[in-house]
Each structure stands twice: as structure tokens, then as C-alpha cells.
Amino acid sequence: MSAAGPSPSSSPSLAAAEGAALGPRRSPAWYAWRRFLAHRLALPALLTLVALALASICALLAERALGFSAADIDLLARAAPPSAKHPLGTDELGRDLLLRLLYGGRVSLGVGLAAALCAASIGTALGLLAGYYGGRLDAFLMRLADSVIALPLLPLLIVLAALDPTKLGLPEEVARSEAASLYRIVALIALVGWTTTARLVRGATLSLKAREFVRAAEALGASGPRIMVRHILPNAISPVIVATTLSVGNVILLESVLSFLGLGIQPPMPSWGNMLTGAQETIWSAPMLAVWPGLMIFVTVIAFNLLGDGLQDALDPRGDVKM
């Protein structure tokens, strides 16, 4: 009697059953999106930031719809209440508050994103160099990072922002231009805000350079810069994205504080911080002039922090999502 075995015709059905039991193959991006959605507040935070960004981008369209500019002054309608002409009222000089908020969002969001990206770029480059080459370069860069961390951040920024750019060799027309204060804030925050990213990238580089694929690239004769850019950086980018997203909110807060103190974005360019400065004289007679920019700062910072938490969960493959 011959032993019974599975017929050839039954093997495809067995493979299909095993495939159905394992479920359809999904890409890593699909699982990351599911982990992102599992964070209940991350998606609302992302939608809030997108709405704020789109509203700020459409500030010129809002000007055309209302029929006047954000810079138009009407001293006869100072601190006016909301109306059909001015949906959120006017500020202390009679300028439309809604348009000022939209243009202020352009500046505050732009400064936050630009400074965070510049700081992340500096920190990523220094972290890669310190982690890959090690030795004295690693010791020097990490002691430099420790020195920057030890400095009191806000007093340091106040001192640096108070410096006269003309005494540093910049032409007076450049130093006094409307955009000079914006570029200066971005540069100052980027110069002191790279330390967290540098430490994260250094730690990831120390772990990755001992992996087999990096050793194989070294054995094939790949140069150090090529290994760092092509092999290490793509595998170390997740903590950089999370740290950059979380730092945007902190940068917006720093810009708002400096602008509130008169050392940040200078009028007539609006930002949420210098709008608070202008509203402090009318805080009792027209409190909404301070409430609206303060609310924009609060919502934006909270949304970026929640988005950063969601990205941290999404980019961590250990955070399994129950299907």
C-alpha cells in the first residue's frame, strides 16, 4: 500500500491559504501611516497646521476679498470691534486684525520652519562627522555641544539679538532692511539649536557604522562621505524628523518672546510676537488684540508638539498597530 501524500493540485491552495493567513504584504510606509493614525491627536494636529499654513499663504487673496491692505492705517477706527468690514476688528492703529494675523502667520511659521531646518542640518552634519570619525573630532564636537547646552538660551539670544549688525561689518542698508531682522533671528536660533539633533545623529551613527552593510561598503572602497550620505544618513533620519518637528514649536516661542521684547521681527513686518507687543498698551480696553495672536501661538506650538509625538510613534517600528 503506497503512502498517501498531498497531490500536486493541492499545493497551490495550501500556499494561498498560508498567504491569506499572513495577510496581504504591506509597505513600511503603510504601517507607519497606521501607527500615525493610532495616535489620536496627531492627525488633528496635522490638519490644524495645514489649515494655518494655507490660511497664511492665502493672505493676499484675503486682502483682495476685503478690498484693503493689511498695512492700511485708519486712526478713526482704532481697536474697533468685529464688523462686516473687519471680521476680527482692528488693531491699535486701525489696521485689519485678520489680515495682520494671516501675514504674521507667514512670518512666525516661516521663521519656525526655517530655523528648525537650519539647526537640523547643522546638527545632522556635525553628528555624522562626530559619530563616524570619532576620536578627537568626536570629543571636540561633543564638548562644543555641551558648552552650547550649558549657556542660558534666552539671555544669550537677547544679547545676540541686541547687537548692532552695522558694527559687525554689514552695510547699513542691509542691516536696516525689513527682512534683516527675520534672517537674523533664523541665524541666531540655528546657531544655538543644533545640539539635540547632533547628539541624536551621533548616537545613531555609532550604532550604524558597526552594521554589516556599512562594513561591506568600507570593504568595497567607498569613501567616508559617501558612506555617511548614502548608507548611514537614510537609516538615521527618523529621529532627525521627530526632533525637527518638535523644535519648530520651541522656535516659534523664542521668536515670539524676542519680538515681544522688541528684539525680534521689527515692524512694520507683522509677526504674532510683535502683535502682542503692540497690544500690551490696550490690553484692558481691547483685550482681543492680545488674545488672537496669543491663541495662534498657543495652537501652533501645541499642534507641532502633538505632530512630533505622532511622528515618533509612526517612525518607531516597534510600535505595533493591532489590525
Image (cartoon, rainbow, N blue to C red):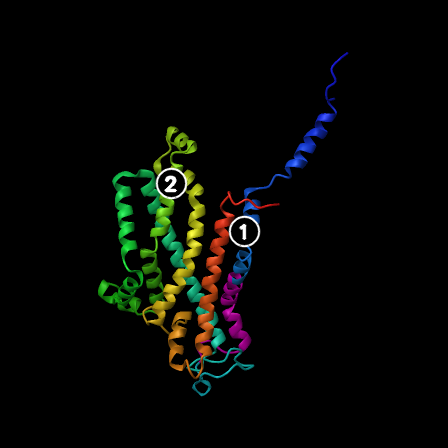
Task: Please state, as top left, top right, bottom left or bottom right, where the C terminus lies in the image.
Answer: top right
The range drawn in magenta is: 49-72
Q: Vertically, is 277 above or below 37?
A: below
Location of residue 13 with respect to 275 vertically, above or below? above
Tell whether position 167 is magenta: no
Going by the numbered disc 2, the residue's amino acid type is: Thr
9 left or right of 122 in image: right
Q: Is residue 105 left or right of residue 19?
A: left
Residue 289 in the figure: left or right of residue 19: left
Residue furthest top in the image: 1
Q: Residue at x 68, y 30 (%)?
A: 15
* Number of other residues with Cα within 10 Å of mark 2, as a class: few under 14, some 14 to 19, many 20 or more: many
Residue type at mark 1: give it: Phe
Pick the front one: 273 or 152:
152
> In the rendered view of the protein, which quadrant contains the N terminus?
top right
Q: CA distance from mark 2 to mark 1?
A: 25 Å
Task: Give the residue at mark 2.
Answer: 205
Label of residue 103 in the image: none
Q: Which residue bears the numbered disc 1?
A: 36
The residue lying at 45 percent from left, 77 percent from top is 289
